[in-house]
Amino acid sequence: MLRLLVEGALDLLWPCTCLCCGEPTPRPGFCPPCTSLISPRDGPRCTRCDAALPTAGPAHECGRCLARKPRFSRGFGIFDYAGPIGDAIRAGKYQRRPDGLPAVARALRAALPAELRADPPGAVLPVPLHLRRVLARRVDPPLELAAAVAAELGVPLAARVLVRTRDTPAQAGLSEVARRENVRGAFAVRRPPPADVLLVDDVATTGATLDAVARVVARAGAERVRVLSAAAVNRT
Ligand SMILES: [Zn+2]
Ligand SMILES: [Zn+2]
């Protein structure tokens, strides 16, 4: 009772504001009009990594996947790293405002591809952040999103299989080659991974991080590795 009164008073003093437009909102995250702007990516995409393709046509892999096969068999990028979803993820990453994460998780659960629902993985693994980074941000977006995906698919969350052994600089602003170099050797397994895994991250740009983690779990014995990012950066 006391807690409810305190929370009610706090709500009056500091009402939630929409992470996207800044208007007051009844619950943390997005206001109803901004929520209505959220929709999964559409248009032609690579059949392997899910990158946007410039033109429609028969299903095929992108040039990047053809030139250098990712270690994962299938990637899913659910939303564009833009609009309300992009705002919420950036707020969590750079402004210490993790209150949008539950809204992203809700949208992600609703938008999981039929392909995954029909053929779910044995377990969902978050791409691990370095402990120092989790402590600094007080939030672990890949873990929270992976938990939402696991709950939605009804499969176990295996949060303690992987560890980030190096606190790598942020990937933003690096070239593709530099990104791969940046995350090389940054991940390790602490225990044998399940045979069929889905790796989950908050944002993917070139997929270098997801591919590096996929290599580590495959080397440790995972037989099928798929990857999912809540948001995908459109690249050319
Ligand atoms: Zn709004
Ligand atoms: Zn591709």
Image: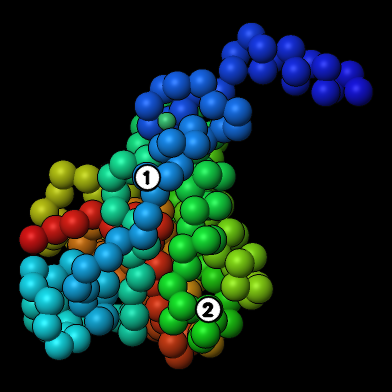
Q: Residues within 10 Å of mark 1 (few under 14, many from 20)?
A: few
Q: Nearer the viewer, mark 1 or mark 2?
A: 1
- Establish whether ligand 1 lies closer than 8 Å to the Cβ of label 1: no
- x and y percentages locating residue 167 in the rendered image: 37, 47
Quadrant of residue 165 within the rendered picture: bottom left
Give SS at disc 2.
Answer: helix
Give the quadrant of the N terminus: top right
Which tag, 1 or 2, sits closer to the chain's start? 1
Up-down: is 121 above or below 205?
A: below
Give the quadrant of the C terminus: bottom left
- x and y percentages locating residue 191 in the rendered image: 58, 74
Residue at 15% over, 88% down: 58
Q: Is residue 211 visible?
A: yes
Could you say which is closer to the camera, residue 47 or residue 135? 47
- x and y percentages locating residue 170 in the rendered image: 28, 45
Give SS at disc 1.
Answer: loop
Mark 2: which amino acid?
Arg
**Image-quarter location of ligand 1:** top left
Up-down: is 207 above or below 142?
A: below
Q: Is residue 193 visible?
A: no
Up-down: is 88 above or below 123?
A: above
Distance, label 1 to label 2, CA atoms, is: 24 Å
Q: Residues within 10 Å of mark 2 (few under 14, many from 20)?
A: few
Q: Which residue is mark 2?
A: 117
Visual colour scheme: rainbow
Residue at 46% over, 28% down: 18
- x and y percentages locating residue 204 in the rendered image: 30, 58
Residue at 64% over, 75% down: 155
> What mark, if any, has residue 131 been given in the picture?
none
Q: Which residue is mark 1?
A: 37
Mark 1: which amino acid?
Leu
